[in-house]
Each structure stands twice: as structure tokens, then as C-alpha cells.
Image: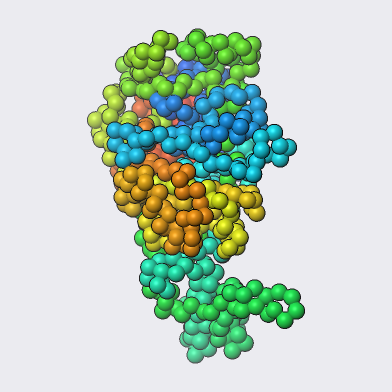
Amino acid sequence: MRIRSFTRRSVMQSLAVLGGMAGIAGLGGTARADSLPVLPDGIGRGRTVGIVGAGLAGLTAAYLLADKGFRVVVFEGDSRYGGRSLTVRPSDPAYRQWWFNRYNPQALFAEMYVSSYRENPASSPVPEEQTCRFRDRRWEPGEEDGPVELFFNAGPGRIPSNHYRLIDLCQALGVEMEPYIFLSESNLLQSAAFDSGRPIAFRQVNYSLLGQLSAAVAQFVIDGHALGQISAGQRDEVLQMLKELGNLQSDFSFSATPELGYSVQPGGWRRSGVVNPVVPIDEILSSGFIGGGNPEFSPGSFLFNSNRIIWQPTLMQPVGGMDRIWQQLLLSPIGAEALTDYGTGGARGQALADRGGEALYLGDLVHLGHQVTRIEQTDAEGITIGFRAADPDGTVSERSERFDYCICTMAPNLLAEIPTTLSERFRTALRNVPKTPAIKVGFQGKTRFWEEEDQIYGGISWTDHIIGQIWYPSEDFTAHTGVLTAAYNRGPMAAVFGEYDQATRISTALEGGERLHAGYTNKVYADQGLSIAWQHMPNQVAGWPGDTAGSYPDIYRTITTQPQGRLYLAGDAYSYLPGWQEGSVDAVFQAVTALAFNLDVDTLRAVQ
């Protein structure tokens, strides 16, 4: 047995990496400056990393490693970037040109603009290609003022304010952010159990409940009963609090108040307005609005969803669509040392030559249409990634490349099915990571009728219909058109919805919309509707992995026992935030920090 000797350089690098790990793990406090990994400059020089997947996780890993001297190749099986972060835009050539002029004037990596997609024909009831035909009918190309931005976030659509790692990454990339509105009190609630299925504004139900509960508790206190640890001397303070909470009268009773909203708005002269009536508490209790259960598999509580830490204000969205995050990753400058010899010939080599070989970007490291078929470590010095890709003559062949390390962001269930040198126990755990189906439908509105008729500016309306929700755009308020997320469901109901053919998905979305907005069918361009069932998308298995850490801790413990040799796994499946981009990004932060740590430090352990 021998003890490894440490140089001053390795000790300094170790301290730097340990500092980064402490910040990521929360050991160094909650300082925002520690949210991005701190890796020593040049630590990757002379070393190669193969990254599987060009979604947010894979591109973030490439961004962090290429900056520190690693030579990087990113393999993506699909013909597009982004993975489950998919934003779909109009196929109209004039709109597309306007978009590139605004966001990517050099027109680099043209596949970043997505106007069509296709579910897996082998499994999906919607095998045909879907093309976005949204159009701003008032815009003429060449006008100084651009069109209303029309995009459908078919994947993630919001960022909670406590997801600071992702927010800090966006800040580092220069991604402009704006508010995403989760709740407008004008949003509608609808269920078959309430008022013969008629929708009602959130505020009318919410403040009816608050007022009646406050009045009941106030009477309880007035009658001399104690509230837990509150002393008798605080009786007046408690009553005052309840009066403010429920907007009670001087005698602590509750009656209709402006918080319930108006059926006739107040205005000038003698227009005093008409306040909406109180909804009796027994009707609220039987309405279905209280909800319950795991919101991952059900709509949850229509009334209390906004109290959840992941949905409460403030939420944010990138200006122009969620894909702006990974698009800015693609456009991040890199040094020439990040390129490997692989894939620099042919059309790619010509593109690099046209740029003089100096202007290099992260997107130059990404190879679309490269389906990874095996990941094997056959010795202690490297790892081989096998893949299927088209040759220059168009024929598809099996090839392989050897790397020092691999970071794989492939869905765990898919990784379990390809040849690897992982143990059978590890592969079984990957195979058993739970999956959550998810579906969305997108419609363009002929007008912004939700604003004009219902004073809804952003937020979500909820229904017990299978569509689950309607999201209203949080951008371009008072414009003449906009895009609705006309259905969003997950879990068992999404599994059912996802088995509908396209015509049924669209007609079902229209039916659900009619429950919330009378005449809805004629207010949207239904013939241009888009639908997506993530459990049927190529190279995906679901909308997101289930809560493995909470529900299957043994499986989670196994899949997060890393690295496995020279293989590191990253993505939201390996986090406590499945389904959120924050979980994906932080798992990558953990992986790249651990990789750097393992390069130069054995943490004073004895080495055989």
C-alpha cells in the first residue's frame, strides 16, 4: 500500500473544487454566488468528455466543461436540440426570418428554430408530423414593428423564483426574464359538482371561503374558547387579525365585500357597482375546488395550488420562450481547444472554415442525429460511446468514440436498455425509475378574448374536465392575439388523453375550453391546434421521471451512487426536483464538480 503524494498545485485545485462542492451541496451557506460550480481554470486540459444528450442538462455540462479546457463531444439522437425543453414557432418563412434577425442574426445552428415535430410512429396514435401554423394576421413583413410573438412551450413553461441555480445560469448566459403569472384572481374554476357546471372566478370562491372561516373562528374566540398557545390576553389581537383576514364587519360577521368581485363594475356618477354574492361554504366544500392528492398525478387543489412553494409567486419565464435558455447555451463562445477531431470534416468543417476557425460556439460541439447505442468502460483508462449516425453518403452505420469520461443525460429507463458495463442491480434500478405521462395542447386565439371578456391577464383556469387546465399567456398583454396552453395534464389522465388520435385530442380540448369560456370553439383557430404527448416522443419515456427520492428511496440511493467508473449520470431524474429544470441543472452541477474533484484528489485516501 502506498500513500499518494500531493503537489501544491493539486492541493490548491482540490480546495477550489471542494469549495464548489460545498456551495452546491449547501454546506457553504446559501450565497447565490456559490450556485454555479467553481472549477479550477484549465483543469480539463488534455482530457476528453463525451456527453449523451443535447437537452438542457447535456448542454449545461458541455458549457461548464468546455470553459475549463475539456475537449467535448455532445451526442444527440434527435434531429433537434433541447430535449424536453421544446418551444414550437410558426413555420411561416417571413416570421422565421424575423425571429432569426432578432435573436440570432448569424443564423447559427438553424435547427434551434423548431416549427414541426413528430411523435414516435411506432407507439403514438398521432404518428403524423405536426407543423405550427400560427400567424399574426395583422403583421406585414418588413414593418418596423414586429409581429406578436407566437410560440407554444410544449415542454417546461415556468421557473419558480427559488430555483436560483437555473436563474443564475440564465443570468450568466444573458437570458432576459419576465414574470410568469401563475394566479390571476380572475382565473376561472369549473367542475361538474358546482353550480350545474358553470365556471366562477377564483376570487369569488376564495374570499367567500376566507370570510366565512374568519367569521366562524372569530365567533369561537368571542365565545371564550382558546386557540392553541394564544393567551387570553391576545384575544383582541386575534380578533383584529381575523377581521383583516376575512374583511369582517364591526360585529365580526361576514357579508359580500368588493374582494368577491363585481357583476357590474363601479364607475362614475351614481354607478356604485354590484358586488358578487357570497358562495356558501357548504357549496364550496362540495364543489371539487378543494381538491387533494398528489398534484403530480391530479389537478390538486384549484384553490390552494398557488400556496405550494414551486407554484407560488414569483415565477418567471424567459422572454420569447423557454428554449431561449438552451439556445443561448448553443451560442456561447468557446475556445478552439474544446473541439475534438470528431466531426470537424464535411459540412461542419466547412461551416467552421467559413467563420475563419476563430468564432467557435458551444453548438459546434453538438452532433444531432447521433443515436447512442452503448456506453462501455472496458479498462481503467477510458470509456467508449457507441452510436448510430449517417455517413457522408447518407447511409447509417454504427461507430464509436473513446473518451476519458462520459456524462449521460439519457432518460434512466432508456439507459437501462442499451449495453453498458453497469451492474445488473444498477440497471434494474434505472429500469424502475417511475415515469409521469404528460400532455399539452396549444391553440392560437383569434383575439385575446380571455382579457377582453373575463379580465384574465395571465394565470391558469382549472377544470375537472380531462384537459385539466388552460394557461393564458403572461406576455404581450392587450395585443390582438396570443397562444393558449389549451390543455395540460399529467399522470393517469394524461395517459388516457395521450391515447387519443389528433382529431380527438383537439375536439376534447375544445370541449374542455367550452366549460370555461362560452363560444370557445369559435374563438380559437382549432384547425391549427397542436398536441404533444411526451410519453410518445422519440428518445423520451414520459413528461418527467416520478418522485423517485420520496417514493422509492432505495432506487434513488442506487442511481445516485456515482460515479460508476468513468460514467456520470445527470438530469432531473437524479435530483429531488424531478420534472423541473432546476433539478436537471443542479444534477449536472454535482456531476461536473465530482468529475473535477476526482481528477486530482483522492481526499487523502490510501490508493492500492
Q: Position of residue 179 (x, y in %)?
A: 61, 50
Examine the rendered structure and indicate whether residue 74 appears above or below residue 282: above
Q: Which residue is pictured at 57% across the width and 30% down the height?
A: 93
Examine the rendered structure and indicate whether residue 290 appears above or below residue 570: below
> Number of labelled discs?
0
Q: Is residue 399 visible?
A: no
Q: Which residue is pictured at 51% across the width and 46% down the height?
A: 157
Image quadrant containing the N terminus: top left
Where on the picture, by quarter, is residue 363? Answer: top right
Q: Position of residue 79 (x, y in %)?
A: 44, 26
Relative placement, left or right, of 28 versus 75 is right
Image quadrant containing the C terminus: top left
Residue 389 or residue 430, whichever sits in front: 389
Examine the rendered structure and indicate whether residue 49 appears above or below residue 98: above
Q: Which residue is pictured at 58% across the width and 60% down the height?
A: 456
Residue 438 or residue 194, whichever sits in front: 194
Q: Which residue is pictured at 64% across the width and 23% down the height?
A: 106
Q: Position of residue 14 (x, y in %)?
A: 53, 27
Give the farthest residue toward the right: 269
Relative placement, left or right, of 467 versus 242 is left
Q: Position of residue 55 (x, y in %)?
A: 47, 32
Where on the picture, by quarter, is residue 268? Answer: bottom right
Relative placement, left or right, of 414 versus 79 is left
Q: Is residue 409 visible?
A: yes
Examine the rendered structure and indicate whether residue 509 appears above or below residue 571: below
